[in-house]
Amino acid sequence: MPRWILLAAMATVGALAATAGDAAASAPTAASAAEPQGKKGEPVCPYCKNDEKVLEGAALKGHGKMPFGKNNSDEIKRFLSYTNPLFIESKHFRIGSLLESYTIPESDWKAYAAEFAELRKVLPAVPAKPKVLDPWLRLHLYALRCEKRYERFLKIIQRKEEDFPDKRIFGAPYMGEGRYLGMQDKYEVFLHKDLRTFTDLLREHSGSTTKKTKREHYVERGALGVHIPMTDEVRADLDLYAHLTHNLGHLFHVGYKHYTYEPPKWLEEGFAHVFEKEVNPEYNSFDSEEAATADMYEGDDWYGAVVKVIDRGRAAPLADLVHRSSFSSFGKEDHLIIWSKVEFLMSKPDLMAKLFDSLAGRLNKEGFGDGSNLQGVQRDFFKKEAGWTFEEFDREWEKYVRKTYITKKP
Ligand SMILES: [Zn+2]
Ligand SMILES: [Zn+2]
């Protein structure tokens, strides 16, 4: 069975910081359950025990108060007082979670082995082969997964941590406004246990009333984030991981050298598909602008389907794709084609890294972000770096597809 989920596009939040009073006044009311308290009034995590040495060894900042969304984790806990969100801060992420315990299906035990081994290196309290992910273990697992995907993105763009200075350095090549790929603040992930907390918190933080995964841009803090509601489509933990990865693909891509304009949509969505399939080839997420419905391809075999779309003469040429300015403009065949075109570029890692580089962080003469004429930028890029016109790109891509997709299994 193919699996998929609809997504809504990015919301921009001009961080109008609410006071504690505002949040408390509009907070849904219910008594919060008693929980064990640590030294600083924080619940104690059974894996790191909130121990500073353990946390440091695991490159984690811990579970305490942290900036989040339009205010901070303590305000969110107060606002969602009818439930108990857990938080963790890692090197590049802040994660809030209301996920419940998850029993790992036996067929998936193997898939988790490497992750548990890695967690145990820094958190010896993690069992070797847990069969159930309790909420704390899930939180630590997602922190590990997010950091892994960040590391992977750095590799794809062929950059190092040190390439992103804390602040813009005038006179040096523009790398954005901060150390998080060019963003000033860490990436945020909130995993909700149901639609109730999701809609309550989103309405409070960005005014959004969507029931679908939502990415957000907190402009004043320079933070990008995503809220994911637990629905049947992401009930299986490895599906949730894939869906999160799709969203991280979007956030990293737009965050690279600072999010001041929209990158080409075909590349952004195509890359998110590729990034997602790296962690779970069977799961697919599709973006759509809020009012529209994504046209989702529901088949399993994306390789075979791409060949069929080409054979039917329905593969959108790159010269057309570079003009699409919304996710809703992609039909189901287009999703296959943009995935495949980015997958083709990923087979040429240097070219892929240079393409991201040349499209991100563009400045005008006054030194401000400039996303104008990106079609022309792409045309010039392929000509200069690969000697291809858009038509020649398409021919090279088709050759690659016909040569390599024949043997690939879905
Ligand atoms: Zn912990
Ligand atoms: Zn997407």
Image (cartoon, rainbow, N blue to C red):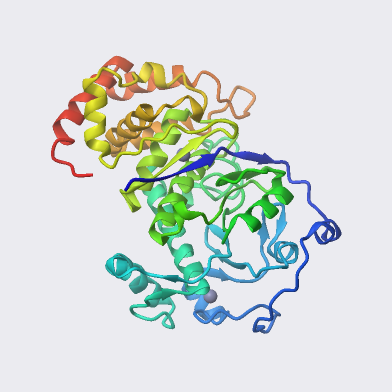
Q: Does 206 appear above or below 117?
A: above
Q: Left or right: where does residue 4 sit relative to residue 392? A: right
Q: Is residue 387 visible?
A: no
The image quarter containing residue 312 is top left
Q: Does 410 appear above or below 100?
A: above
Q: Does 258 appear above or below 237?
A: above
Where does the image place residue 122, in percent across and percent down from the top left? 42, 76
Q: Left or right: where does residue 303 sit relative to residue 24? A: left
Where does the image place residue 155, in percent across and percent down from the top left? 36, 48
| Front in this rendered view, residue 369 or 337 | 337
The image quarter containing residue 195 is bottom right
Q: Is residue 162 visible?
A: yes
| Front in this rendered view, residue 334 or 388 | 334
Q: Residue at x 61, y 46 (%)?
A: 167
Image quarter hosting the C terminus: top left
Q: Residue at x 68, y 63 (%)?
A: 73
Q: How many marks?
A: 0
| Front in this rendered view, residue 20 or 93 | 20
Q: Residue at x 48, y 33 (%)?
A: 294
Where does the image place residue 211, in percent across and percent down from the top left? 60, 46
Where does the image place residue 78, in percent across and percent down from the top left? 75, 66
Q: Does 172 appear above or below 114?
A: above
